[in-house]
């Protein structure tokens, strides 16, 4: 009878040790998966920062003034012409598309499909928001 108890206790101890090893493996895998998600998020953030820098650079380029000087006899006139930049609607659409695509790719299990749907939705929302801002600036 003592041998039966000994065998039963040994079986319980061994099974608990195996279960502990499996839980450790699951915890390790969960940690690796969460690190992969964070790395992907950081990559998207970095790419969005690069895009925002490009947009700011383009904005600065379009705001440079061109000075034209006309001389006639003793009269000098100076005319400044300012290039038109992107409208708020266009900026909103581009930014919204980028953010929507990045968010869709991160959230969706099907990355490409999520990026496409997110980009389209983001572009629509961004264009709408930009149009509202344009309308309020005109008033």
Image (spheres, helix red, strand yellow):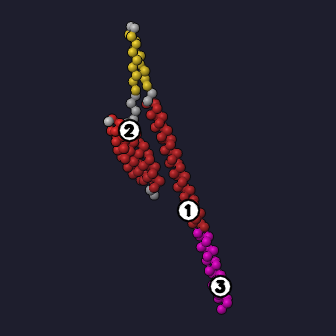
- Up the image or down, 115 lies above or below 68; here it is below
Secondary structure state at the residue bearing disc 3: helix
At 40% across and 13% down in the image, what residue appears? 76
The residue carrying mark 2 is: 88
Whether residue 4 is situated above or below residue 126 in the rendered picture: below
Q: Tell me the residue at 57%/62% (across/down).
A: 29
- Bounds of the magenta span? 1-23
Which element carries disc 2, helix, strand or loop?
helix
Q: Which quadrant would the C terminus be assigned to in this image?
A: top left
Dot 1 falls on a residue whose secondary structure is helix
Mark 1 Cα-neighbour bin, 10 Å: few <14, some 14–19, many ≥20: few
Instruction: Name the foreground residue: 133 vs 81.
Output: 133
> Residue 30 bears which disc, if any?
1
Label the magenta part by its dominant secondary structure.
helix
Q: Is residue 78 left or right of residue 20?
A: left
Residue at the outermost front position = 139
How far is the residue under mark 1 from the one under mark 3?
35 Å
Of pointers 1 and 3, the one earlier in the residue sequence? 3
């Amino acid at each position: 009878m003592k041998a039966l108890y000994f065998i039963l206790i040994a079986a319980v101890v061994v099974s608990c040790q195996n279960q502990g090893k499996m839980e450790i493996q699951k915890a390790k895998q969960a940690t690796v998966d969460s690190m992969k998600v964070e790395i992907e998020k950081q990559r998207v953030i970095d790419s969005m920062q690069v895009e925002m820098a490009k947009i700011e650079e383009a904005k600065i380029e379009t705001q440079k003034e061109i000075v034209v000087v006309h001389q006639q006899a003793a009269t000098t006139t100076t005319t400044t012409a300012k290039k038109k930049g992107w409208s708020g609607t266009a900026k909103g659409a581009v930014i919204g598309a980028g953010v929507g695509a990045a968010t869709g790719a991160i959230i969706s299990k099907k990355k490409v499909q999520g990026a496409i749907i997110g980009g389209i939705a983001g572009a629509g929302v961004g264009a709408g928001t930009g149009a509202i801002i344009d309308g309020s600036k005109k008033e």
